[in-house]
């Protein structure tokens, strides 16, 4: 890795651990969020969530935002069986609900669906999600006869802004919404390396630019930082 510091733009706020890890390897990360998420904190939703608190449901979380929103709205212990996406979401589920509640986890919604389907006792799941949730998991479960009740606990808003710095070595994208928000006001030059957190985000990027991307295999910012470190440790930057 070159001695001068690399400059990376993250389109979301990262954990202090991720920032510090990058900085130890001379990677400076600017954080500029292009979306905001807010819990849907209505009395109607509070009533719905309270109805689930004492039920032995099978709950599904595929984003950290959904876990945080549930905790902000309901903030209660639950007797649930929980399935979730790995790394950041799984860690938060473990912290809020307890690791013993996690019955299965995976690196993608499609893989998580397969794990849920292995449990023949499951006939219905409660999918806590955002208003702009992805289709893979509910479609796959419904196709196999599993009832999916979707409870939307947060909403996402795009917050586009013009990026003033033009000399970034790389840009990190964590969601299709952030991709669309970014490219609504910005263009990038060919020298900037783009990193995407999964295929869906990569597909969104390719709707705006035709460029080779580096895609993280697992949905967590830790893996994204590892991708950045790995790429720039073997690539010479002019």
Image (cartoon, helix red, strand yellow):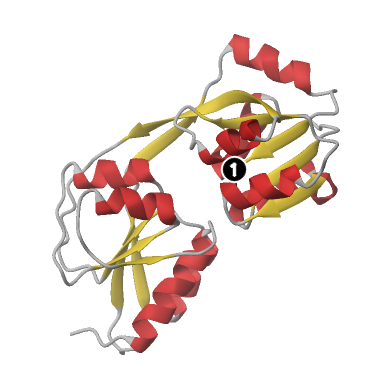
Q: How crowded is mark 1: few (under 14 residues within 10 Å), some or many (20 or more)?
A: many
Residue 131, percent across and down?
47, 27
- Number of disc labels: 1
Residue placed under numbered mark 1 in the picture: 62
Q: In which quarter of the image is residue 106?
A: bottom right
Can residue 50 be seen here? yes
- In this view, 97 is above or below 168: above
83 to the left or right of 235: right
Of the 4 image quadrants, the one containing the C terminus is bottom left
Q: Nearer the viewer, residue 163 or 187?
A: 187
Residue 207, percent across and down?
24, 48
At horizontal 80% and vertical 51% (from top left) the residue drawn is 99
Disc 1 on helix, strand or loop?
loop
Can residue 92 be seen here? no
- In this view, 68 is above or below 197: above
Q: Nearer the viewer, residue 121 or 63?
A: 121
At horizontal 62% and vertical 33% (from top left) the residue drawn is 143
At horizontal 53% and vertical 56% (from top left) the residue drawn is 219
Residue 132, percent across and down?
44, 31
88 to the left or right of 195: right
107 to the left or right of 93: left
Of the 4 image quadrants, the one containing the N terminus is bottom left
């Amino acid at each position: 890795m070159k001695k001068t510091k690399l400059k990376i733009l993250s389109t979301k706020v990262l954990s202090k651990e991720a920032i510090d890890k990058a900085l130890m390897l001379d990677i400076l990360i600017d954080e500029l969020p292009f979306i905001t998420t807010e819990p849907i904190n209505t009395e109607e939703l509070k009533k719905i969530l309270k109805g689930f608190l004492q039920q032995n449901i099978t709950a599904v979380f595929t984003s950290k935002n959904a876990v945080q929103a549930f905790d902000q709205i309901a903030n209660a212990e639950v007797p649930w069986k929980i399935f979730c996406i790995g790394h950041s979401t799984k860690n938060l589920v473990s912290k809020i609900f307890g690791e013993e509640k996690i019955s299965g986890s995976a690196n993608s919604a499609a893989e998580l669906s397969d794990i849920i389907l292995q449990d023949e006792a499951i006939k219905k799941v409660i999918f806590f999600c955002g208003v702009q949730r992805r289709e893979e998991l509910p479609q796959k479960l419904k196709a196999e006869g599993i009832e999916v009740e979707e409870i939307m606990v947060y909403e996402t808003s795009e917050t586009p802004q013009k990026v003033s710095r033009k000399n970034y070595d790389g840009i990190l994208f964590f969601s299709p919404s952030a991709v669309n928000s970014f490219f609504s006001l910005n263009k990038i030059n060919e020298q900037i390396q783009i990193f995407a957190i999964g295929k869906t985000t990569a597909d969104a990027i390719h709707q705006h630019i035709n460029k080779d991307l580096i895609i993280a295999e697992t949905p967590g910012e830790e893996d994204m930082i590892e991708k950045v470190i790995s790429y720039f440790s073997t690539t010479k930057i002019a």
